[in-house]
Image: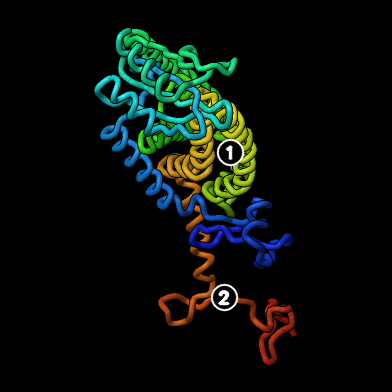
Amino acid sequence: MTNAHPTGDPVALDKRGSGPAPRHSFLERLYTGTGGFPIVSRRKLFYSLAAIFVLVSLLSIAVRGFTLGIDFTGGSRIQIPATAEMTTQQVEDVYSDAIGHGPVSVQKVGAGASATIQVRSETLDIEQIDAVTTAMLTEFEPKDASGAVSRDAISVADISETWGGQITQKALIALLVFVLATMIYIAIRFERDMSIAAIVSLFFNLIVTAGIYSLVGFEVTPAAVIGLLTILGFALYDNVVVFDKVEENTRGVMHLNKRTYAEQANLAANQTLMRSISTTIIGILPIIGMLVIAVWLLGVGTLKDLALVQMVGMIVGAYSSVFFAVPVLVSIKERWGPVAAHTKKVLAKRAEGASGARVPVGAGASAPRGPRPTDSGAPRPGSRPSGKRQKRRH
């Protein structure tokens, strides 16, 4: 059981509610969900952190932009089997000598026998592709599946700018449709204030995830866009779980004068905190497996783009559903309406109780009236009877 300190911070009580509960370790309080972590009462701190995250993300997007993949910008992609002696710098030097300028990017994908070197550049014509292929064939002697040195071991793919523009347009339309559909669902699923808080949290997830991609320089590919849509769904699921608990805890709170809406919402955030952490960890584990097996061992670059955005988005979504969405909901509720009036009423009663019912004599108020020692029913010595005497007539 928990109660609230006059400052608004939750204080744990024992099962009888008669006094402070014994102190437990941080992990035990986190696991039980009744540790009273002051999430709502410290919402200004979490608002400051959220503002910093959003500001840095927007600045990075405006200044650095995104590292768009070849599917969006168009260009040529050259892929050559990697050997133990081959480095990305050597491949870049061979490309520069053959073309006269450097490529857009050179990276190694995969490990062991499946490792490859991928070169991404602007669109090359037939003569340039032939020059690069010949130079790499002479320098590195790549081998095909049969083990023979062959030009076929070097693969070249061209993506036109028109195709890249179409992919970009379709990706933006898909993102917009998904966001609108999510907002409609949120508006139907939750009441007004919860809908506003959930939508604000949704845009927070979008901006911060995009900002991390821009800041770190992760390549944005169609797979990354698909992954972004996936993690927005995960963040929505986490919001539904947390807000369902808030609804459960705050049901009937307006008819009581012991706890405020904020304290009940803070309890809900504590009770779902461990669940959010566990769900995020369980969701990240297969993503790590995807990165290790599919990307590092098998060299499937598409899965890398999908896994990265999912990992980033799941962490951001789990954080925002507890430490951002719930405080935003409480701030909206306490701004106006019956919850604001109820909160003032509870805090006023709590302040009155904290000041004490007894007021010292001479402090500007009369002394409290308490039971007198003779109020038990026995008359005081020497006092006149309280009843009316019947006069006797002689």
Q: Secondary structure at mark 1?
A: helix
Residue located at (54% from left, 70% from top): 357
Q: Quadrant of residue 353?
A: bottom right
Determine whether 322 is above or below 162 in the image. Answer: below
- Crowding near pointer 2: few (<14 within 10 Å), some, many (20+)? few
Q: Amino acid at mark 1?
A: Val
Determine whether 191 is above or below 359 in the image. Answer: above
Near-viewer residue (368 or 170): 170
Determine whether 222 is above or below 304 in the image. Answer: above
Q: Amino acid at mark 2?
A: Arg
Near-viewer residue (1 or 214): 214
- Crowding near pointer 1: few (<14 within 10 Å), some, many (20+)? many
Q: Quadrant of residue 340?
A: top left
Quadrant for the N terminus in the image: bottom right
Relative side of 36 to 1, left or right: left
- Which of disc 1 and disc 2 is earlier in sequence? 1
Query: Which marked residue is nearer to the observer: mark 2 or mark 1?
Result: 1
User: Disc 2 and disc 1: Cα gap in Å?
Assistant: 49 Å
Q: Residue furthest bottom?
A: 382
Residue 41: image x %, image y %?
A: 48, 54
Residue located at (44% from left, 25% from top): 140
Mark 1 — residue? Answer: 242
The way the protein has been coloured in the rendering is rainbow
Residue located at (24% from left, 22% from top): 100
Residue 40: image x %, image y %?
A: 49, 50
Relative side of 149 to 124, left or right: right
Mark 2 — residue? Answer: 369
